[in-house]
Image: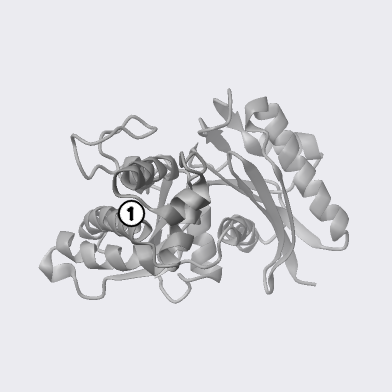
């Protein structure tokens, strides 16, 4: 029987988990509310509930451990999650120890930043598979980033490398959630992009978006921009082109720094597809030095939410390869 792993993707709103068979990918999934406002004990309980639900659905699965992708900083030992955004009163928690205690197991538990997990999912199951090295950017509530080098995550000296969302493209620009002025997240993170879109529609007009989001645009969301752009709405197309240009700015800086010329774009906002990717492809060449422009490629990750779960499961498979057993120590 092929070995399996549980891969979980912890978001501020929802928790998604999958039972993953190495040879076949995802074979079962569960989804539930994170309950972030209820604090860390509740959230940890939700993760355990998801694990038990998957085990109950496939009781014969040869499960070797749990991988968890989560927002926030993860220590180099890949066991402690530090100050994840949107989860109340979390602080610094040894997730490995907490889950083992609650589940009564000595399974390996590997924790990774959610963008890193998504990048691993792409590298081994998605758009990144043909490429040994690439830059991953996830466009969602925030803007996440990861660096894949030779199919492995480059994590830096403390485990926090790849925070592309907090790279500045305008030192006098708006402040992002981390307090960084002019960071790309403060332009195309979901909340910021929606506010820009609302202002644009109020100034320029868009009957279609007003029908979708209400006359006051209170319900406006990036998915509506994508849908409207597909229908040919000029305002939605202009907003996404603006966002794509900003994305190209920061990608140029990343390529100049790393000399990695393949970029994979994932996350919910990437659902806009070519409406945001093509402007990014055009803009990025303005910001890459001439001698480094050859081979610059921007791809869309089509795995969606599955990328993070698959990447988290891969952490367990990688552990099994390294240790050759089900030992709980990593």
Q: Position of residue 146 (x, y in %)?
A: 41, 53
Q: Residue at x 82, y 47 (%)?
A: 52
Quadrant of res 234? bottom left
Q: Residue at x 82, y 50 (%)?
A: 53
Q: Is residue 269 left or right of residue 175?
A: right
Seen from the viewer's position, the closer of residues 149 and 199 is: 199
The image shows residue 86, relative to residue 190, as above or below, that is: above
Seen from the viewer's position, the closer of residues 261 and 204 is: 204
Which quadrant of the figure contains the N terminus? bottom right
Could you tell me which secondary element the residue under label 1 belongs to?
helix
Seen from the viewer's position, the closer of residues 99 and 216 is: 216
Residue 76 visible in this rendered orientation of the protein: yes
- State the count of labels: 1
Q: Position of residue 171 (x, y in %)?
A: 18, 37
Q: Residue at x 64, y 56 (%)?
A: 316
Mark 1 neighbour class, 10 Å CA radius: few under 14, some 14 to 19, many 20 or more: many
Q: Position of residue 30 (x, y in %)?
A: 74, 53
The image shows residue 21, relative to residue 177, as above or below, that is: below
Q: Is residue 297 left or right of residue 52?
A: left
Q: Residue at x 53, y 54 (%)?
A: 117
User: Where does label 1 land, which residue?
Assistant: 239
């Amino acid at each position: 029987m092929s070995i399996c792993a549980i891969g979980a993707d912890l978001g501020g709103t929802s928790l998604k988990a999958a039972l993953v068979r190495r040879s076949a990918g995802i074979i079962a999934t569960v989804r539930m509310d994170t309950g972030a406002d209820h604090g860390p004990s509740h959230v940890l309980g939700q993760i355990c509930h998801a694990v038990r639900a998957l085990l109950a659905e496939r009781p014969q699965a040869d499960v070797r451990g749990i991988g968890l992708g989560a927002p926030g900083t993860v220590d180099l030992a890949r066991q402690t999650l530090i100050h994840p955004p949107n989860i109340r009163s979390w602080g610094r928690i040894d997730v490995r120890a907490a889950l083992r205690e609650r589940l009564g197991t000595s399974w390996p538990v590997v924790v990774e930043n959610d963008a890193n997990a998504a990048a691993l999912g792409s590298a081994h199951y998605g758009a990144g598979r043909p490429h040994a090295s690439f830059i991953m950017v996830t466009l969602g509530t925030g803007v996440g980033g990861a660096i894949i080098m030779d199919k492995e995550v480059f994590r830096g000296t403390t485990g926090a490398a790849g925070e592309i969302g907090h790279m500045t493209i305008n030192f006098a620009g708006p402040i992002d959630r981390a307090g960084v002025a002019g960071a790309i997240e403060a332009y195309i993170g979901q909340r910021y992009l929606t506010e820009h879109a609302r202002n644009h529609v109020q100034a320029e007009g868009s009957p279609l978006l007003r029908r979708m989001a209400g006359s006051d645009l209170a319900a406006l969301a990036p998915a509506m921009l994508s849908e409207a752009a597909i229908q040919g709405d000029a305002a939605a197309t202009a907003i996404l082109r603006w966002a794509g240009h900003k994305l190209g700015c920061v990608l140029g800086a990343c390529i100049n720094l790393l000399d990695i010329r393949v970029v994979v774009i994932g996350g919910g906002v990437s659902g806009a597809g070519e409406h945001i990717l093509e402007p990014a492809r055009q803009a990025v060449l303005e910001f890459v030095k001439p001698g480094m422009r050859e081979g610059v490629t921007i791809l869309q990750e089509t795995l969606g939410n599955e990328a993070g779960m698959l990447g988290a499961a891969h952490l367990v498979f990688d552990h099994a390869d390294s240790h050759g057993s089900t030992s709980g120590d990593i």
